[in-house]
Image (spheres, helix red, strand yellow):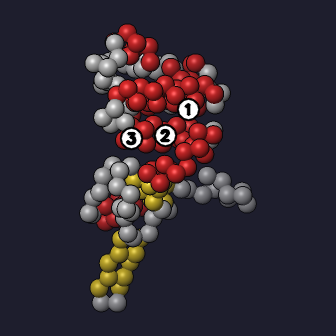
Amino acid sequence: MWQKNGDETWLLAHTEIQGKYEPGFSERMFVYNYRIFDRHRKPVVSLAVLADEGPAWKPKPFSYGLWGFSITMEFPVVKLNDYRKQWDELEKSRNPFAVAVMAHLKTQETRHDHGNRRKWKLRLIRNLYERGYDRQDVINPDYNGFRGGHNILKLLCRKMPFSPHVIPGKILKSLCPCNGSDSF
């Protein structure tokens, strides 16, 4: 990347998406950060994205010390669950990651309620059109032109699967025209 003063700076980003509590998570963050640094000899920024349902868990910095030596690694933590309180902001955001966060939150919320899941999935798809994404961006799973090759509907299909017992196959395929490897 380029700094404001024109100097080139390497930045290696290490992102861990963690779906459940793990006792040794902070140590793993440290190990992966160091391994990336060791291999490339460039600064590494580590970030944790917590996708678990528990409201309380946030990993603590990793540290150890012995005989006067000590080392501590702190890293930013984003807890997706915290965004429940910011739903209105997510709906208004132009950031495509906002849609991913909304899909994740509604997936957790509608885990055992297929009718409500269908409602939310359709609402999120409608929201994409309201954000200005065109049909090609939203529903064509083979289109690679969308903002660097991302496909939002593929994400929604994977993140918020419908049960084929709730929605007939033809309707299901029209909502989620994902490839055959995606499970509904």
Residue 23 placement (x, y as % from top left): 26, 63
Q: Amino acid at mark 2?
A: Met
Image position of 166 (left or right of 138): left
Residue 26, quarter of the rendered image: bottom left
Closer to the camera in the image, 164 or 61:
164
Compare marks 1 and 2 and give the one earlier in the sequence. 2
Number of on-image labels: 3
Residue 131, quarter of the rendered image: top right
On the image, numbered disc 2 is attached to which residue? Answer: 102
Compare marks 3 and 2 and give the one earlier in the sequence. 2
Give the Cα distance between marks 3 and 2.
Answer: 10 Å
Residue at point 48%, 42% (across, down): 101
Residue 116 drawn above or below residue 94:
above
Residue 80 drawn above or below residue 42:
above
Tell me the element at label 2. helix
Residue 183 placement (x, y as % from top left): 30, 25
Image position of 113 (left or right of 74): left
On the image, numbered disc 3 is attached to which residue? Answer: 109
Which disc is residue 148 wearing? 1
Residue 175 drawn above or below residue 41:
above
